[in-house]
Amino acid sequence: MTPQTTPQQQDQSPPRPSDARPPIAEILQLAQKAPSVHVFLKRALETVAAAFGSPFAVIYARSGAAVVQEETHAGPSDPGFWRPGVERFLTESMTASKPRARVLSAAGAKLQVTLLAAPVSNARLGLGGTIAVVSPGGAPEARHKLERLESLATLVASAAATVGTTTDSGANALAANKSLARAATAQTPEELAFSITNNLRTRLGCEQVALGMVSGRRVKIMSISGLDEVKNRTPGVGRLRCAMEECLDFGDTIVSQPDGGWFEDGPHAGGFRLHQQWQQNAGGACVASVPLYAGKRCAAVLSLRRRGDEPFKPEQIEELRKAVEPFASALLLLHDARRGLARHACDAARAAVHTITGPGHPGRKVLAAAALLAAGWFCLGSLEYQLTVPARIVPAVQRHIAAPFDGTLASVAVVEGDVVHKGDVLCRFDQRDLLLQQGQLQSQIAVLQREQMRALAGNDPVSARLAEAKWRLAQTQLAAVARRIEQATLRAPFDGVVIHGDLRKQVGSVIAQGTPLYVVAPLDSWTLEMDIPENAADELAARLETSGGEATVGRFAGNARPEADLPLVVTRLRPSAEIRDGHNVYVAEARIEPDTTWMRPGMEGLARIDIGPRKVWWVALHNVLDTLRMKYWL
């Protein structure tokens, strides 16, 4: 969606400045003062819009039977300009039920804004809806802004449950416990950590509460109360993380406070330098870290800081641990649900290795050993590289039969595909004119013989010699006619099969001398032609060169009889490429033992050629690698 703006609307006038207080504190204060959930949501929308410098924001929510639909705008822009697009985006986000962001660009200008939407949901209160805001800026900041809006929306939903409650200490404690329980409805580990730390800070009266998740032997701080964002590179956060990791290594609660307290005579007394440094940098405050376990696994570490005159007591720490530790499993669950594909695969592999290398499971160990052996063979072993290519049967010898003279085709005895024997009639030409000419020449020869005899009887040697010459000429012409009469009947030159020639439609037509009529091939001599792809031509040529030209062995399976595969020997690789079926290939020729019971010229199938030993991984992956190199220039 690209909104069309007017020059006045493109003017980036500064939005309404936000309150100096953090939006979290302002939202919590609004929840205490608001007379109803509707009023609270309206004012919270204004606070959220101010926090983002938004010129327009909308909230739509249902609380029981009541419907809350409010909007707010700031700056000189017309709210009617933003309303249609934001309401469409709000409707789409309500259908998706998850945080969404969309970057918009104004036509003809460099102005960019981002539409942000996050769900506002509280199951126990019966509250469900979505908040959408327009935030200046483009894609680089969109992700961070969306996470911030998601956190504020979660806070608004949690704080809505406290609207109209009593303010006495018992009610506050109950509300804090309920808020802590409602944190379990969070959809991300950061959201859950944010809810836990801020609720505990209010409940325990701490200066700071921090929660970090355990990853291996390290701790990643997820939330620090009072902060919208945790900057891990700051010195204060670094000291806090080191203290958490000290607690993780120790595996139990660590407390460091001015009077030593309940740790002086216990098994945990002294020796926690990182907590002592944290305490000194905090001006002598009371600090504590509590490991949170999910089963036997330490999932998170909770750290607290209070004023030096309010030391921690053992019963408080134990009560806190019992209240918060159930959320350790929820943190792990949310963390696993947000993993990407690569992280999920790494974690699964790590878990599989731990299962295999741990005690027990002999079957898995055997399978793992077999898999390692297979992987080693795949990477280091060798395998016969076999090339499978299309192939076709062609005759090794072909005899072309053409029209012996200009004549009329009288009859056809065979057609393409017929098996013939030596001397079988293929076709006949019309002999009537030739027979008539033969009779004329025979009569002429008889007359010339009598003339010669009369000349000899009359003692006329000149006339006798002239008659003899004419007689010999007629004899030669008669022999030529007899030859043509013999050629008028075309016969098979050997046992074989007619692979080309169907003259049935030309019977009665005049055939010119030299016109191709039939192609006959013997049944006991075949050649196999194979289409070798360009990327394998060099491999085959090298094998032929090293083997002396006729040592490459393979098998051929025809489509007609795939079960009757026959041995072949490659004899020649043609030097130039040819186009076959739209592909550029090199044609290789192979000698094959014929099987006259079923083999016919032109039959197709597959030929498998043994090229030689290659690495297993190369045999399996070289086609994929070649494709990637050609497509992506790797």
Image (cartoon, grey):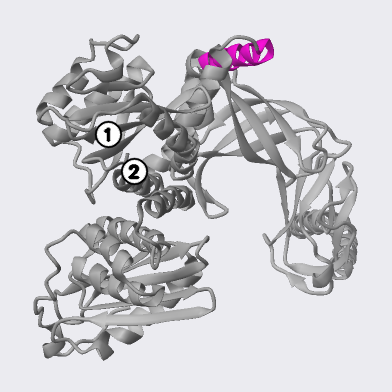
- The residue that disc 2 covers is 200
Contact, mark 1 vs mark 2 (Cβ under 8 Å): yes
Q: Quadrant of the C terminus?
A: top left
- Residue for badge 1: 304
Identify the residue at horizontal 85%, vertical 35% (top origin).
596
The residue under the point 18% across, 31% down is 309
> What residue lies at 57% left-to-right and 18% top-to-bottom?
355
Is 589 in front, or is 379? 379
* Label 1: which secondary element: strand
Q: Is residue 396 left or right of residue 336?
A: right
The answer to whether 61 is drawn above or below residue 471 in the figure is below
Q: Nearer the viewer, residue 395 or 230?
A: 230
Is residue 138 found left or right of 343 in the rendered image?
Answer: left
**Which residues are drawn in magenta?**
361-377
**In the shown orientation, is residue 189 left or right of residue 133?**
right
Q: Position of residue 535 (x, y in %)?
A: 46, 36
Q: Which mark is residue 372?
A: none
Q: Classify residue 144 by image quadrant.
A: bottom left
Amino acid type assigned to the residue bearing label 2 in the image: Leu
- Residue placed at 53% from the left, 55% from the top? 582
Q: Position of residue 189 (x, y in %)?
A: 40, 44
Q: Nearer the viewer, residue 241 or 99?
A: 241
Is residue 386 visible in the rendered image? The answer is yes
